[in-house]
Image (tube, coloured by chain):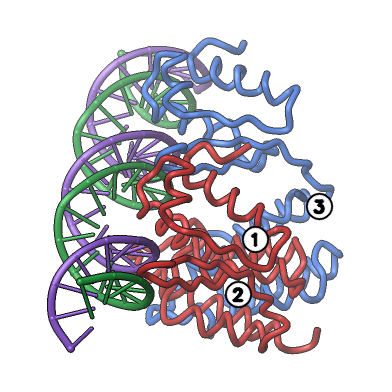
Chain colours: A blue, B red, C green, D purple
Amino acid sequence: MEGQNISDIIEQYLKSILADSEHVEIRRSEIADLFDVVPSQINYVIKTRFTIQNGYLVESKRGGGGYIRIERVNLLDDIDVLNTLISVIGDDINERDAVSIIQTLYDEDVISRREADLMAVMVSKQTLALTDRQVADVLRAHVLISLLNRLRYES
Amino acid sequence: MEGQNISDIIEQYLKSILADSEHVEIRRSEIADLFDVVPSQINYVIKTRFTIQNGYLVESKRGGGGYIRIERVNLLDDIDVLNTLISVIGDDINERDAVSIIQTLYDEDVISRREADLMAVMVSKQTLALTDRQVADVLRAHVLISLLNRLRYES
DNA sequence: CCATTCTTTGACTAATGTTGACTAACATTA
DNA sequence: TAATGTTAGTCAACATTAGTCAAAGAATGG
């Protein structure tokens, strides 16, 4: 079932630590050595198995004393709303549609008036001032999806 | 726990003093000796961790009796925080400095934790995913200034 | 058996930290 | 005032981590 491949084994290892602790902090090369894989495989495991959809937050730092930290977070009840809205966004979105999504979030009490205002500023044409409107639409979609993903959990 | 590298440890040391006092005045070589690093590492720590974006002012003097003085500034007391921070941003800004500014806004009770989190998402590299990093830095400055300006209204 | 998806690998890139040689500013003393 | 000593500042080389990406290999489903 599980544990067929090394990625699954590493996943289980990390999750066994996360069963007791709210977070786990690793040195990438150490875990890679422990399981005798190349360091980038750790990135693969994290990218495929410790996503925000699964309730995990990942942060890292490079350089001396660098680390990768995985944190377990509480997903909120608004998941369905958020999933629906994210699926609506697609690869690009114009300002009008973006604002209507933000309005929906406010109507559904997912965000406050002030948060809605900040988000609206963020997706406005004026803020995303780029010469290429297509690029701006793509970027706006990026921004919105990032924000919605952030709303999935609370810290 | 963080602070695996010596720069983090020195940062924590200085901040522990600043927790009680409005300022800390050091002799560079003494701190360098204390932590067994070269003197210029102290400059590195200050340059990366005690910037105005972080709410600190640094002044120093060379020659006999020289010193480095780090002061915690209360941006709210002085002038308008927002104006101060906006003037600091300039034409472009990297993610690190942007996050420092957002952190300062939170420290100064201008924004809530959640608003800070959302703003951090907005200025993150991942969100502002552009091929050209320079363009991303310019856009980030634009975004931050737009957000700060929005914080002026209502309240 | 083929096509598709998932996993593994490593070369290259990026970010951050550490070090030391050299420079600049200031103070003291001759 | 000039010379010397005592500090801090700058900068570039080097060191130490993690991230990206695409190609190759393995597993899976039809």
Residue A93, percent across and down?
55, 69
A36 and A85: which is toward the camera? A36
Disc 1 and disc 2 in contact, CB within 8 angstroms:
yes
Report in which chain the residue with disc 3 lies.
A
At a point 47% along the width and 47% down the height, the residue shown is B7
Is residue A73 toward the left or the right of residue B39 in the image? right
Instruction: Give the alpha-carbon distance from disc 1 to disc 2, as whole Å.
Output: 10 Å
The image shows residue D19, relative to residue B103, as above or below, that is above
User: Amino acid under label 1?
Assistant: Leu
Image quarter of the N terminus of chain A:
top right
A130 and B103: which is toward the camera? B103
Report in which chain the residue with disc 1 lies.
A
User: Amino acid under label 2?
Assistant: Met
Residue A78 disc label? 3
Residue B81, percent across and down?
66, 82
Which class describes the residues within 10 Å of circle 1: few (<14), some (14-19), or many (20+)? many
Residue A122 disc label? 2
